[in-house]
Image (cartoon, rainbow, N blue to C red):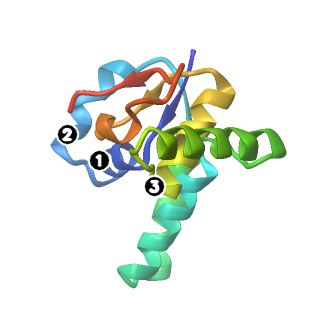
Amino acid sequence: MALVVDTDVLSFLYKRDTRADLYRPHMSGHMLTISFMTLAEMERWTLAWNWGPRRREHLERYLHRFVFHPTSRILCRKWAEISDIRKRAGRPIGVADAWIAATALHLNVPLVTHNADDYTGIPDLMVISES
C-alpha cells in the first residue's frame, strides 16, 4: 500500500527527530509518496536556512527514497474542493495543507501527519497520526 507523507513527518525523518519513531511502524513496508507541495516546502527551507551545496545535495539524495507526485488538472480540482469544503465549514485550510490532502485523496491513500487537526473535516481523507 502507498502512503502520502506530510512535510512535518518528512522533516522528522530527515532530521532524525525522535518524533519520527512514532511514524516508522506505520510506514514500514509501504510505498512512501510526497506531494509536489512537500518538495516545494523542503526547497524553501534550504533557502530560508541558507543551506550550502553539500547540505542541499544530501537532502536531494534523501528525497530519492520517496515517490514524487506532481500536480495535474485532477489534483487541482481536488485542491479546490478541499479548500471550498473547509472554507464553508468555517475552518479554512492552508494552501500547502490543502495540496497535501488533495494528493492523498487523489491517490486514495492515507496521509501520515503529525498535525491531524490541520486535516479535520475533509471527507474521505484517511489520516494516520500520533499527535
Judge by depth and name the residue closer to the eye, 29 or 115: 115
Contact between marks 1 and 2 (CB within 8 A): the answer is: yes
Q: Label 1 sits on what residue type? A: Phe
Judge by depth and name the residue closer to the eye, 52 or 35: 35
| Residue drawn at 52 percent across, 57 percent down | 95
Give how far across and how far down residue 10 sits, in percent. Answer: 40, 46
In the visual, does 107 lie left or right of 11?
right
Q: In this view, does 57 lie above or below 78?
A: below
- The numbered dot on residue 94 is 3
Which of labels 1 and 3 is toward the front?
A: 3
Judge by depth and name the residue closer to the eye, 115 or 82: 82
For marks 1 and 3, give the CA distance: 20 Å
- The numbered dot on residue 47 is none
For marks 2 and 3, give the CA distance: 23 Å
| Residue drawn at 63 percent across, 52 percent down | 36
In the rendered image, the residue lying farthest to the left is 18
Mark with earlier residue (2, 3) = 2
Label 3 CA crowd tier, 10 Å (few <14, some 14–19, many 20+): few
Q: In this view, does 94 lie above or below 115?
A: below
For marks 1 and 2, give the CA distance: 6 Å
In the visual, does 14 lie left or right of 76?
left
Label 1 CA crowd tier, 10 Å (few <14, some 14–19, many 20+): some
Give how far across and how far down residue 23 sits, in percent. Answer: 30, 29
Q: Label 3 sits on what residue type? A: Gly
| Residue drawn at 37 percent across, 32 percent down | 120
Which of labels 2 and 3 is toward the front?
A: 3
Q: Is mark 1 on a helix, strand or loop?
A: helix
- The numbered dot on residue 12 is 1
Q: What element carries label 3?
A: loop
